[in-house]
Amino acid sequence: AQSVSQHNHHVILSEAASLELGCNYSYGGTVNLFWYVQYPGQHLQLLLKYFSGDPLVKGIKGFEAEFIKSKFSFNLRKPSVQWSDTAEYFCAVMDTGRRALTFGSGTRLQVQP
Amino acid sequence: KAGVTQTPRYLIKTRGQQVTLSCSPISGHRSVSWYQQTPGQGLQFLFEYFSETQRNKGNFPGRFSGRQFSNSRSEMNVSTLELGDSALYLCASRRVPVGGNTEAFFGQGTRLTVV
């Protein structure tokens, strides 16, 4: 069974600081990779996705992620966070055969003004 | 374009009762999946429906069931409710093009409280 690990459970940053959230997965087959965000009181929204091709993917709101196949990693980055980025971030993997998302435990990001 | 719509938003039920949750996918999306979100277990996959057939199932007891209608709308049912079933239940829809990959879009969820 595949699993997803998010190493940072709670991150506190000041505005303008850089962000990197780690995500590692365990599965040897073909996967699709995602980062979702859940703002307080809102539904899960897609930040970015990786299916194939360029391992550096750009998403909404200035977020990007890099897929490193040899490390089974898909880390999320943003050069300069804003107070409005305060939310919970979930890394997810979809086994292309099973079509079910496996989520990490989430990282709560708190950005202080 | 309307998003994924889940009803009701909130439910309070008593142990032993059953409950039915509803999900209307984005127009044109034929795959509907259900997830359970709890503070302790996080987000866990329940099942996926496509063309009115359950295609995949997560590791949940048989008390959790679902169905999909010809218009792609889906319902999930939980029978003999237990306190541990208290959770946010999320529905996600996908377009599923032939030979392609697509992302899942989530609804606001139904917050179920079992007392």
Image: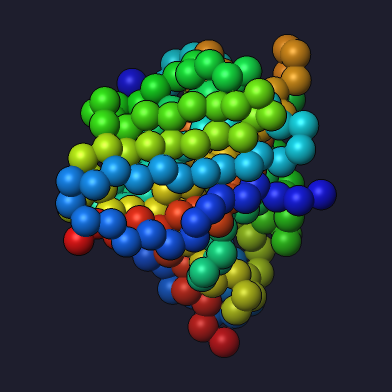
In percent of width and height, residue B77 lies at 38, 37
Extreme residue toward the bottom, this view: A113
Q: Residue placed at 35% from the left, 56% from the top? A: B112
Q: Residue placed at 69% from the left, 29% from the top? A: B71
Q: Is residue A105 among the parts visible in the rendering?
A: no
Q: In which quadrant of the rendered view does residue B64 lie?
A: top left
Q: Residue placed at 43% from the left, 62% from the top? A: B10
Residue A72 is left or right of residue A63, and the answer is: left
| Quadrant in the picture for the N terminus of chain A | top left
Residue A85 is left or right of residue B54, and the answer is: right
Q: Residue placed at 58% from the left, 19% from the top? A: B52
Nearest to the observer: residue B104 or residue A19: B104
Nearest to the observer: residue A61 or residue B86: B86
In percent of width and height, residue A93 lies at 50, 32
The number of callouts visible is 0
In percent of width and height, residue A47 lies at 65, 51
Say how the picture is coloured: rainbow
Nearest to the observer: residue B50 or residue A20: B50
